[in-house]
Image (cartoon, rainbow, N blue to C red):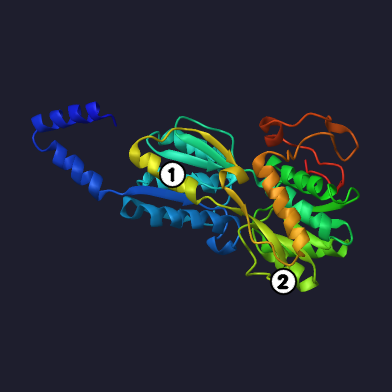
């Protein structure tokens, strides 16, 4: 608030007698209510765990200025709309909805509560009181691919996909592109589990992929089951969204870690300060929103190659979706000398050369 505006309000309050004292007491007594809606359990040690780490960071940073709450394991669809509306009706003025399938429910509830600020993770629909935010997960997948290309003896990686949306597809493509910079004949076998968090299906998928020759397992699902199966079967793999090394210390090579803390803290500060505005954020290595877990279970030269790829992306020296890139049929999707813009990446609906499997219709 500008000083002149504040002084004007203060003068008006003095004329009204006790108004400034009432405003002051209310501001001091009422912390900002912040709600979080999670698609999985907080103990998944993956996607939801990373978001809850961010929630706790907000509490640690802002103390009694905020009061946070969360609802876990909320199914995408009608049930999420009910949960989001309940959080808004209970006085939360900032609500983070942390899964793609919450997009339309978030927009609907935001129309009913125009004085509440909403932040939707991984979506693309915005409104005056709805922002969107995401991480360039595909950057980490490319790094994983470079590592896999150097370590895989079979030349086959198994990749467990959650749901067939561009976010997942672009990660598959980035991985095989990175892997083929090392081994041009590398292949990726994919399995879709049609869920973000289903330890049973994820574990069974990892077993099936290993049986098909994969000696490295990657995933865009949220539980530690694939890594645990990898360790049991004597193969290697990558964690998802959080450092999962505690679950499979002999199997995890590294993990793409989602670091939401600074974003969540800043957006809470923006609401408190009255400076919050609708925006779209898509950050990667260069923003600090994506980091790699410590490199392990690999020779030093492989770790060095992974770190070099990470740094190359951060500095803009490596452009992942730069042509020539072909799809599964051999058709050119990205001509030589050109690169995909963010719009083309965000709407990606094709699989790159070297991937065995299809995108479900």
Residue 1's x, y, as percent?
29, 32
| 189 versus 136 height, above or below | below
Which residue is painted at 47% across and 50% down in the image? 36
In the image, 355 versus 155, the foreground residue is: 155
Cβ atoms at labels 1 and 2 below 8 Å apart: no
In the image, 170 versus 92, the foreground residue is: 170
- Horizontally, residue 279 falls left or right of residue 17, namely right
Q: Secondary structure at mark 1?
A: helix
Q: Which label number is shown at residue 250?
A: 2
Which residue is painted at 73% across and 38% down in the image? 319
Q: Quadrant of residue 47?
A: bottom right
Q: Which label number is shown at residue 289?
A: none
Question: Total marks drawn?
Answer: 2
In the image, 182 versus 188, the foreground residue is: 182
- Within 10 angstroms of label 2, few (less than 14), some, or many (20 or more) residues? some
Assign the C terminus to one quadrant of the image: top right
Residue 59's x, y, as percent?
39, 55
Q: Is residue 204 visible?
A: no
Alpha carbon distance from label 1 to label 2: 37 Å
Q: Quadrant of residue 299?
A: bottom right
Which residue is painted at 57% across and 53% down in the image? 39
- Horizontally, residue 1 falls left or right of residue 253, namely left
Q: Secondary structure at mark 2?
A: loop
Residue 182's x, y, as percent?
84, 50
Residue 318's x, y, as percent?
73, 41
Q: Which residue is mark 1?
A: 266
| 247 versus 75 height, above or below | below
- Within 10 angstroms of label 1, few (less than 14), some, or many (20 or more) residues? few
Q: If you read the primary sequence from the N terminus, does the residue marked by circle 1 or circle 2 appear first?
A: 2
Q: Is residue 17 visible?
A: yes
């Amino acid at each position: 608030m500008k000083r002149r505006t504040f002084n004007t309000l203060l003068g008006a309050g003095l004329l009204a007698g006790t108004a400034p004292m009432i405003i002051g007491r209310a501001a001091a007594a009422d912390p900002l209510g912040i709600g979080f809606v999670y698609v999985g359990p907080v103990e998944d040690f993956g996607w939801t765990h990373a978001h809850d780490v961010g929630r706790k960071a907000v509490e640690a940073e802002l103390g009694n200025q905020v009061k946070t709450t969360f609802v876990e394991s909320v199914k995408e669809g009608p049930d999420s709309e009910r949960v989001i509306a309940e959080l808004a009706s209970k006085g939360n003025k900032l609500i983070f909805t942390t899964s793609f399938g919450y997009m339309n429910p978030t927009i609907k509830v935001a129309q009913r509560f125009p004085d509440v600020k909403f932040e939707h993770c991984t979506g693309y629909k915005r409104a005056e009181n709805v922002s969107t935010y995401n991480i360039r997960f595909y950057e980490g997948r490319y790094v994983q691919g470079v590592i896999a290309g150097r370590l895989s003896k079979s030349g086959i990686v198994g990749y467990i996909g959650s749901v067939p949306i561009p976010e997942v597809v672009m990660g598959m493509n980035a991985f095989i592109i990175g892997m083929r910079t090392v081994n041009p004949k590398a292949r990726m076998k994919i399995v879709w589990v049609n869920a973000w968090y289903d330890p049973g299906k994820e574990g069974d998928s990892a077993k099936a992929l290993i049986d098909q020759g994969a000696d490295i397992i990657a995933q865009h699902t949220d539980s530690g089951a694939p890594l645990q199966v990898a360790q049991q079967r004597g193969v290697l793999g990558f964690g998802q969204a959080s450092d999962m090394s505690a679950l499979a210390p002999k199997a995890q090579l590294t993990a793409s870690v989602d670091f939401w803390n600074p974003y969540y803290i800043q957006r809470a500060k923006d609401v408190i300060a009255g400076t919050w505005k609708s925006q779209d954020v898509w950050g990667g290595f260069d923003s600090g929103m994506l980091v790699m877990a410590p490199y392990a279970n690999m020779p030093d030269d492989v770790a060095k190659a992974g770190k070099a790829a990470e740094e190359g992306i951060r500095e803009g020296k490596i452009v992942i979706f730069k042509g020539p890139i072909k799809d599964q049929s051999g058709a050119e999707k990205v001509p030589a000398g050109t690169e995909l813009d963010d719009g083309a990446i965000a709407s990606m609906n094709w699989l790159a050369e070297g991937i065995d499997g299809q995108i479900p219709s």
